Image (tube, rainbow, N blue to C red):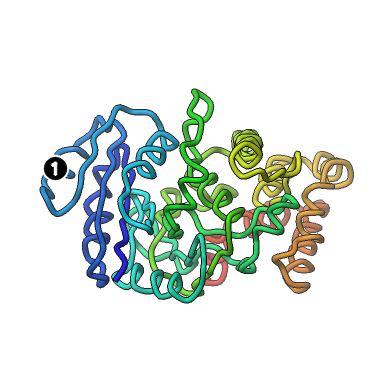
């Protein structure tokens, strides 16, 4: 039986860290190790982590951001496989067993699985991420600039040797976060990716009670596109210097273009919506029409919903944007 490490990276999440650690310790796969890296927390996290004693390996470091924590994780992991679990998320008991079953079935660099979306109190929201699945050879599409559908950080298990081809990632004042971007997309350049089409864990969304156009917990809509462009440029440098792979200058990603779409039309006057849709929507429309991971039905549905932004009735336009941007908004409509 091959050993697997669940690495939990934590910063000031004393409210959730116990549940994350317990979910890692509760795996039904006997050869599971648990490492917790605390990135300079100033709340009560460190005392909670220390209370687990020898049941886990604890690493207490100065605050350096998520990239720094991932660099440390990849350096110290002693097993051939690892899951990098965010400290506000959790894994279901069979997660490692099912991941290792997938790894043993092929020469994969990454195995990804769905995550149920939960609210801040752990309540199920009725939706999951991601909603699309990539082909095993998504690396070939990545080389053409297409970012493939992937769950957030906690829904990915990696071959550690592949991670070490990508990490350490350069650290700087502007590159402290988004470390999972480099892991998720970097390892796909090194081999095939397997997808498990069931939920093996939960992704916590802290604004679930009042869903708007913002779904993820990271950057705001205005900051996200700039951050993603910077990460792509960094990954491009890593791919060229370490892997001898030349990535294109720009990338294609619906989530990225969706942020531009929301910023341009949400809560905007009719004239501004028309201006954006007719003058600035090329990248957004291309990410729908040419999307290699979507079927015709999904493409047509998204185009129809997007066109509602051209109607003069603002509440309908804003509803369409929320529906496109945030899976939680869709579930609320369905529950009525």
Reply above or below: 74 against 65: below
Q: Nearer the viewer, residue 314 or 95?
A: 95
Q: Position of residue 42 (x, y in %)?
A: 25, 30
Q: Secondary structure at mark 1?
A: helix
Q: Is residue 266 left or right of residue 54?
A: right
* Front-most of residues 54 and 24: 54
Q: Quadrant of residue 94?
A: bottom left
Can you name the residue that lies furthest to the right here?
Answer: 278
Q: Which residue is found at the position 70% from the left and 59% from the top?
A: 140
**As drawn, which residue projects farthest toward the top?**
173
Residue nearest the observer in this picture, 52 or 225: 52
Q: Position of residue 50 (x, y in %)?
A: 14, 42
The quarter of the rendered structure image containing the N terminus is bottom left
Nearest to the observer: residue 211 or residue 100: 100
- Is 4 situated left or right of 300 in this image? left
Seen in the picture, residue 241 relative to 15 is either above or below; the reply is: above
Provide residue 51's location: percent of width, then percent of height: 11, 46
User: Which residue does the numbered mark 1 point to in the structure image?
Assistant: 50
Q: Residues within 10 Å of mark 1 (few under 14, many from 20)?
A: some
Relative placement, left or right, of 227 versus 292 is left
Residue 289 screen position, x and y as percent: 81, 61
State the image quarter where residue 136 is shown: bottom right
């Amino acid at each position: 039986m091959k050993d697997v490490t669940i690495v939990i990276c934590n910063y000031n999440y004393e409210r959730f860290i116990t549940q994350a650690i317990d979910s890692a310790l509760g795996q039904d796969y006997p050869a599971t190790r648990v490492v917790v890296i605390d990135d300079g927390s100033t709340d009560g996290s460190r005392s909670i982590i220390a209370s687990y004693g020898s049941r886990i390996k604890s690493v207490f470091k100065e605050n350096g951001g998520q990239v720094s924590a991932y660099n440390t994780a990849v350096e110290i992991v002693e097993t051939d496989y690892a899951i990098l679990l965010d400290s506000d998320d959790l894994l279901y008991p069979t997660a490692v067993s099912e991941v290792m079953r997938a790894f043993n079935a092929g020469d994969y660099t990454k195995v990804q699985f769905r995550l149920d979306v939960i609210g801040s109190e752990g309540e199920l929201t009725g939706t999951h991420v991601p909603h699309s699945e990539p082909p095993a050879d998504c690396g070939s599409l990545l080389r053409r600039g297409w970012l493939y559908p992937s769950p957030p950080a906690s829904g990915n298990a990696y071959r550690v040797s592949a991670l070490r081809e990508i990490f350490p990632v350069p650290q700087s004042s502007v590159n402290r976060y988004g470390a999972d971007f480099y892991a998720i997309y970097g390892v796909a350049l090194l081999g095939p990716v397997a997808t498990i089409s069931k939920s093996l864990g939960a992704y916590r969304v802290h604004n679930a009670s009042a869903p708007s156009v913002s779904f993820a917990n990271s950057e705001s809509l205005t900051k996200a596109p700039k951050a993603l462009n910077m990460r792509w440029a960094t990954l491009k440098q890593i791919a060229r210097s370490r892997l001898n792979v030349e990535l294109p200058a720009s990338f294609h990603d619906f989530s990225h273009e969706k942020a531009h779409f929301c910023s341009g039309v949400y809560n905007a006057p009719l004239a501004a919506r028309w201006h954006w849709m007719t003058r600035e929507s090329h990248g957004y429309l291309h990410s729908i029409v040419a999307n290699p991971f979507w079927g015709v039905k999904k493409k047509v549905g998204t185009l129809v919903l997007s066109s509602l932004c051209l109607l003069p009735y603002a509440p309908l336009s804003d509803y369409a944007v929320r529906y496109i941007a945030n899976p939680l908004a869709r579930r609320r409509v369905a529950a009525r």
